[in-house]
Amino acid sequence: MRTAVVVFPGSNCDRDVMNAILDMELGPVDMVWHDEDGFPERPDLVVLPGGFSYGDYLRSGALAAKSRVMKAVRGIADEGGLVLGICNGFQILTEARMLPGALLPNTSMRFICAKSFVRVERADTPFTNAYASGQVVQFPIAHHEGLYFLPPDELGELEARGQVVYRYANSSAGSADAGEEYSPNGSLNGIAGIINASGNVLGLMPHPERATLKGLIRGTDGRNFWQSIRNHFGALEANG
């Protein structure tokens, strides 16, 4: 498989994503500047990384959603390729209307940089299949606008369609409330990550790429995130 990581002015997690993918040996990675019309070679996976695209001017992700490369990103999604937006990338996907909802300022009105636990709500997607449904994993968070919002009726429809795939949890083990829903940023229903109706576009606020490399204090729960993507393409290849 081949990955394209889009680099916007202000991206700061693009190299983290590249290093995680290379460490997991998922194949070559193209770093693509936001002003390009397309990709050097057709990617199987496009990643919109975390950071502060355009300095978060106007709204987080609003200007990046209008970047020239986003037409090509949408084209990959329309063709069934995988598109992943992490943190600022999630904000960009909502601003581009490739995912529903919006990411609003945290209820604390402060930037949060901390470890966090998320519960895997579905284990049948290209981004979760190496986990078990209900499994709680640790991915760090680092954001100021992470409160996922949708109007009540639309939020109910999103939940009914099973588009919530990651949800914040209190902790992974060791207490009576381990794994229970929790919103460190005020996100509605504790939502940490959602997928589109077709199942190939994921927006995720926590950072699996920061929980991938072995020997780092953030742990390695993110390795199965990338393994899920590998499994997905392996299954496609096996099925012709």
Image (spheres, rainbow, N blue to C red):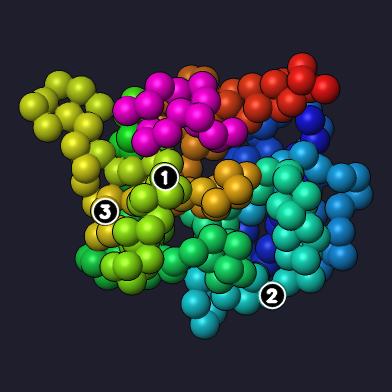
Answer above or below: position of 124 versus 99: above
Earlier-in-chain disc, 1 versus 2: 2
The residue depicted at 78 percent of the width and 49 percent of the height is 79
Instruction: Judge depth for marks 1 and 2 and give the one in front.
Output: 1
**Decide: marks 3, 2 in contact (CB < 8 A)?**
no
The residues colored magenta run 120-134
Q: Nearer the viewer, residue 167 or 163?
A: 163
Left/right of residue 200 with respect to residue 136 in the rendered view: right
Q: CA distance from mark 3 to mark 2?
A: 29 Å
Q: Amino acid at mark 2?
A: Lys
Residue 6 visible in the shown view: yes
Q: Name the residue beneath numbered marker 2.
A: 66
Q: Nearer the viewer, mark 3 or mark 2?
A: 3
Above or below, 145 relative to 40? below
Which quarter of the figure has residue 21? top right
**The one of 52 and 194 positioned closer to us in this rendering:** 194
Disc 1 marks which residue? 162
Main secondary-structure element of the magenta-colored stretch: loop
Rendering coords of residue 52 (x, y %) = 54, 64
Mark pair 1, 3: CA separation: 13 Å
Q: Which residue is at 79% across, 30% downward?
A: 1
Residue 144 location, quadrant: bottom left
Task: From the top left corner, tell me how far across and down residue 86 is, in percent.
Answer: 53, 50
Indicate the amino acid at tag 1.
Gly
Magenta-span inclusion, residue 132:
yes
**Residue 28 lies in the magenta-colored region:** no
Q: Nearer the viewer, mark 1 or mark 3?
A: 1
Residue at 82% across, 22% down = 240
Q: In this view of the protein, can residue 217 be seen by the observer?
A: no
